[in-house]
Amino acid sequence: MKNKHTLIIFIVLAILFAGSCSTSKEEMGVPQTRNYKAIVADSVVFEWLSELDLLDYNEETEELLLLDKTSNEVLIINEEGELLSQFNPHIEGPNYVGDYDFGWTFYDNDYLICYGTYYFHLLDKEGKRVKRFPYPVETNGLWMLDYNPRMLFDYEYQGDDKFVAFITAPQGPSYPSMDYYDSIEMVYAIDVESESGYSIMSKPESSTYRNLKGYVDHGWPYMTNYFGSKFAQIHSIDSMLYIWNAEGDELLNSIVIPKEFQPDYEVKSYGDSGKPDRFRINSNVYSTKDYILLHSLKIVPESIKSELRNKYPRYWESEEYREAVQKYMDANYLVFNEEGFLGELKYETGPTGVNRLSTKKDFIWKDRRYEDERDYRTFLKVKIVPVEE
C-alpha cells in the first residue's frame, strides 16, 4: 500500500514538473521563432527617367525624399507619385551644401536637414537654406561607406524633433588601436536650436570590438530608428544587436544574434598591416514599427580581392571576381523585435534594387528593379508577415 501511495505521488509530481517545463518561450518573455516573408503591399509610380535613391519618408505627411543619382537633384514626391519639390543643393550658390552629402532627413514636417561635407544645413522644403551649423566634433575627414548605411535620422521625443548623426572620422585615437575601439565616439544627438550635440550609443564594454585583442575593421555603427527615440544598432562583426533609447542614451537590450548567422572573420594583431579577411558580416539594419530586419551578408574575403586588384585595374569586372562572388557571397535576412530574435525572412517581392528605407509604419520602402530602361520609377511598400504554418 505504501509503495502504491509513493507511485501516485511520483506521478503527480512528474505531471506538475512537466507542466512547469512546458511554459512557452513567449510566457517567459522570449519570442518564439518562426519563418517570415516579405510581400509587396502597395506601390508608388513616379514618372522619372534617372535612377533615384530613397533618402527619407515622412510618416505624417506621407512624402518621400529622393536623390537623382545623375543630376544630384533632391526631389520630394507624395504617395500619388506627384512631384512636390525639386532643387539642386550641390550647385554653388546661397543654398550650396557641398559637392556631395552624407544624408538627408525630414525635420519637423516643414523642413529638411542635410548632412553636408562641412556643416549640417537646415533648409525649407523648396531647398532654401535657413541656417547651417558645424558638426559637434572635430573630424579627420569623412568616409563614404559600402552597403549604403543611413547616417542621419530625425526622431521625436515628447513632441519635439531632434536628430542623430553618424560621424565616421571624429578626432581621437587612431585606427587600429585598442584606444580607438574603447573610446572613439561616432554617434551624436544634435539640437537644432542650440546648434550643439553630444555623443550617444557608445560601444558597450561587452562589445566584440572591445574584446578583440586585435583589429578587424573600423566598427561602424549602423542604425535604424523604429519608434519614437528608440534605435536598433549593429556593428559589422559584433555578435549583438543593440536596442537604445537615444533620449537619455539608455541601452535597453543586447540581443545575441543566432550562432549560425554571427559574423565570421580573422583578427590581425595591432602593429600588423593590411585588412583581415571577413567572411560574414552584419551589413545593415532596417525596421518597421513592429520588426527589426538585420541583413547578414557573406562576402568575398579581402585576401581574394587584394589578389585580383594586383591583376586587374578594374578587378570587379573580371571573370575571376564574378566567380568569387558566386563562391562566397550569400545573404540572410533576420527578423527581430526589441525583445529578441523572431526568425528568418525570405523575400517574395520579385526583382528589386539595393535601396531599402525604414519607416515607423508597417512597411519598408524598396525600389523595383527593371532590366530595360523605363521613363518611370516604382517604389514598393514591402511588409514583413509571418509564414502560415
Image: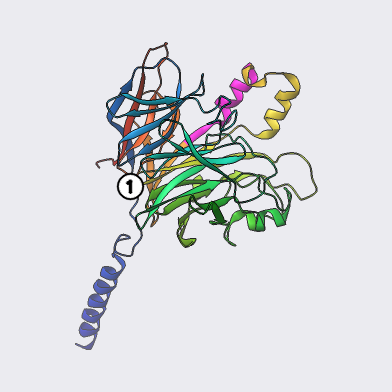
Q: Residues within 10 Å of mark 1 (few under 14, many from 20)?
A: some
Q: Residue 174, percent across and down?
A: 74, 49
Q: Is residue 239 visible?
A: no
Q: Residue 140, percent across and down?
A: 70, 43
Three-letter code, disc 1: Lys
Is 199 within the magenta? no
Q: Residue at x 25, y 74 (%)?
A: 16
Q: Residue at x 49, y 46 (%)?
A: 223
Q: Residue at x 78, y 41 (%)?
A: 273
Q: Main secondary structure of the magenta part?
A: helix
Q: Is residue 142 visible?
A: yes
Q: SS for tag 1?
A: loop
Taking the image as shown, residue 119 lies to the left or right of residue 293, namely right
Q: Which residues are magenta?
A: 319-331
Q: Residue 359, percent across and down?
A: 36, 41
Q: Residue at x 50, y 22 (%)?
A: 69
Q: Residue 109, percent across and down?
A: 35, 42
Q: Nearer the viewer, residue 385 or 90?
A: 90
Q: How is the image coloured?
A: rainbow
Q: According to the image, label 1 marks what residue?
A: 289
> In which quadrant of the rendered view does residue 28 lie?
bottom left
